[in-house]
Image (cartoon, grey):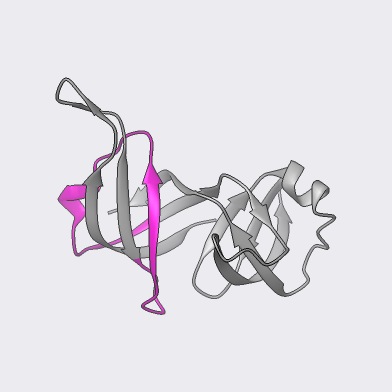
Amino acid sequence: MITKVLIKKVEKGAVYNDLVYDYWVTCCLQDNSEIILFDSKPLDLSNLLNQYVEITIRALFFEQRANKDLRSFQGKIVKKENVYFFTSEYINIEVRKEDVLDNKTELEVEDIFYFGRLDIINVCSG
């Protein structure tokens, strides 16, 4: 499942001997809320600044108990073709099966979910 975002800023993450190992990408969702995504590939999306792109996002982990240190979204967890996703009107996030099971998450039930680092897995268009 993809998410359409507007690329607002791309910052270098880890750099060693002028080699960039990863990036932090600031994006706007279609509801104008801002999110920061980690690009570990690294894809270097700086050539797509101020453009809309469709991307695949994966959460490092998620929780269902309130955690002020994590980014929260309201939506539900669904299963498609043996892959679990958080889905809402503006963002879709692939989540780990282990987190779904460990949290005893009910599928297709609207709730607030708290996410650790969000990673860019793939850029589908740009």
Q: In the displayed structure, would residue 19 be above or below residue 48?
A: above
Residue in the foreground of this view, choosing between 29 and 70: 70
- 31 part of magenta stretch: yes
User: Where residue 78 sits in the image (x, y, percent)?
Assistant: 72, 60
Q: Which residues are magenta?
A: 28-54
Task: Give the quadrant of the C terminus.
Answer: bottom left
Q: Which residue appears at 49% of the width and 72% of the height?
A: 90
Q: In the displayed structure, would residue 76 be above or below residue 54?
A: below
Among all residues in the image, which is located at the extreme bottom?
Answer: 31
Residue 114 seen by the camera? yes
User: Where residue 67 sits in the image (x, y, percent)?
Assistant: 63, 63
Q: Which residue appears at 36% of the width and 33% of the height?
A: 41
Among all residues in the image, which is located at the extreme top?
Answer: 17
Residue in the foreground of this view, choosing between 32 and 47: 32
Task: Give the quadrant of the N terminus.
Answer: bottom right
Residue 82 seen by the camera? no
Horizontally, residue 80 falls left or right of residue 34, namely: right
Q: On the image, which quarter does residue 65 sit in?
A: bottom right
User: Where residue 20 sits in the image (x, y, percent)?
Assistant: 23, 30
- 13 part of magenta stretch: no
Tally of numbered discs: 0
Horizontally, residue 90 falls left or right of residue 84, namely: left
Horizontally, residue 10 falls left or right of residue 22, namely: left
Residue in the foreground of this view, choosing between 101 and 48: 101
Among all residues in the image, which is located at the extreme front?
Answer: 68
User: Where residue 51 sits in the image (x, y, percent)?
Assistant: 22, 63
Q: Which residue appears at 77% of the width and 68% of the height?
A: 108
